Structure formats: structure tokens, C-alpha cells
Image (cartoon, rainbow, N blue to C red):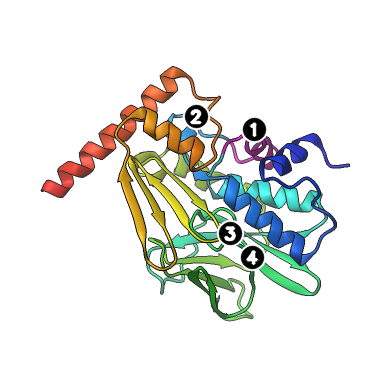
Amino acid sequence: MIPGIYTDYLGRIGITDPGSPSAEGLFALARAHLERIPFENTEIQLGRPPDIDPELSVRRLGEGRGGYCFHLNGAFAALLEHLGYDVTRHLGGMCADRDSEEVSGDHLTLTVRIDGQVFFVDVGLGDGPPEPLPLREGRYERGFRYGLRPLGSPDAADAGWTFLNEDSPFPAMNFRSAPAAMADFADEHLRLSTAEDSPFLQSFFMLRRTAGAVDRLHGRTLIHLDPQGGSDKRELASPEELFDAMATVFGRELDDLTHADRASLWARVQRAHEAWLASQQG
């Protein structure tokens, strides 16, 4: 029997019977998670960053929240393991330079071995692929363009892989092949969720990946991107519009946000927006 917290999580992503481990089941679970659970930093913006303990993350997702990679991939890995999948966690790092070989440790990613195959699985990128990719070198069209290539020598202690996301502000994510544990991410989670120079503190954002598009909320700007290069952008003019978008576009439950929380979040969004406008005029 699946524990209640995993039942709630599966209910959130709309899967009532995940079945036995299979490649088809893995793909269905990943697609469902990405379509219904947003990459977001609401609670970090409000000064109460949630811990990355996987059981807590599973509970939070089942209650309607989102998170970033340590929460999302942490919970997804725990769910897959409870369903019988062979999951490995990996230390990764986001890169603005697609040619960088650095692995900073600011990202948790996953691989899953099933039926003699290994898949790259990541529900914590926000704008990553809508389904797992075979862990082998190549280019992959999944609406948007992606790629995988080896990182370093296959026999080296620091060997790994580079995931390429050509349409992202971070076009590369490097990760080590060696297994990692959740404890390996604790220091970086503390930095990302509390340091003043962390992008998670500086800006409010949400992302949701569907099979055919990416929805992105950055401050007051809501963007819908499609693989053909088209985009629909609009500015949210009021807190009511912001919270409506959070609930309807990104599927985040808002019952944990008090009136004071909403006022605080809108004030932060407004200050960041005004600072951005001032920088454009300079």
C-alpha cells in the first residue's frame, strides 16, 4: 500500500494508479508532475524557506505547493522509489556558459534505470524537457531543443554529463555521474534560500512546463512561450491579477498565504519591478 502522503502527491498530479515500474509509467509520472506542479520560490520570498527533507517536500507538493530543484526532484525521487523505481540522485550545477565544465552543486538532478535503459529525469528545471531523455549523447526535439553530452573522461573520478537547454537563460546543466545524497545539497540550499545575492531572494518567479509550452512568471511579467519562438507577454497590474495567475496558470494552492503574506509578496514584487524600470532608464 502506498503511504498517504504519496497518495496525496499522486492525486495532485492526477494519477490514481501508477502501476508497476515501466518506462511508460515513468514518462507519464514525469509529464504529469511538470504539468501540475510549478517551479516557484514563494516561501523563500516570504522569508520562510522550506527544508529539503524529501518527506516534507512530498507533503508540501501534496498540499498544493511547489518549490525549486531540491524540493521538486527530491520529492519526485522519493515517490519513484516508493513505486519501485531504481533512482539515482546526482550533484549538478546550472551554467550560463554552455561550454563550462563546472559543477557548482546548486542543482539536484536524477537518473532512473529501467528495462536495461538509463534515463535523464528532471522535474526541477522549470523549463526543462517535458519527459525523460535517454542518457546518451545526442540532440533531442521535445518541442524545444535539448541535448546531452559526456562531461570529462568516462574513466575520471569527476565524470558526468552536460544537459543542454538551448532556449533557456541557463543553457547548460552539468552533473556528476556519482550518486549523491540529500545531505550533499544542504549547504547550497541554505545559501540559495537565505543569501541576499541569491536569485531566489532577488526576484519572485514561477515556471510550469507542459507538453507544448513554458509558462513563466517573473515578478509582474507573465510570459507564455511556445516552441516555434512565439510568445505572449503581459504585465500584471494588481495583486489580484498576480494571485489569480499563481492559482490558475501555475496551479499553486494559495490557502497557506495570509493577507499579510500577500501584501508582503506584492510589495516585494513591486519594489523589484520599480528597480528594474529604473535600470532600463539608466
Q: Which mark is residue 48?
A: 2
- The kind of residue tagged 2 is Arg
* Circle nearer the N terminus (1, 4): 1
Mark 4 sits on what residue?
132
Mark 3 sits on what residue?
91
Q: Residue at x 15, y 42 (%)?
A: 278
* Circle nearer the N terminus (2, 1): 2
Q: Is residue 67 left or right of residue 86?
A: left
- In terms of secondary structure, where does tag 1 sit? loop
Q: What is the magenta range?
A: 51-65
Whole-percent x and y of residue 77?
A: 70, 52
Q: Is residue 81 left or right of residue 137?
A: right
- The kind of residue tagged 4 is Pro
- The kind of residue tagged 1 is Glu
Measure the alpha-carbon separation of dots 1 and 3. Answer: 27 Å
Measure the alpha-carbon separation of dots 2 and 4. Answer: 32 Å
Measure the alpha-carbon separation of dots 1 and 4. Answer: 25 Å
Q: Quadrant of residue 62?
A: top right
Q: Is residue 185 visible?
A: no
Q: Which mark is residue 63?
A: 1
* Circle nearer the N terminus (2, 3): 2
Q: Is residue 199 visible?
A: yes
Q: Is residue 138 above or below residue 29?
A: below
Task: Assign the N terminus to one quadrant of the image.
Answer: top right
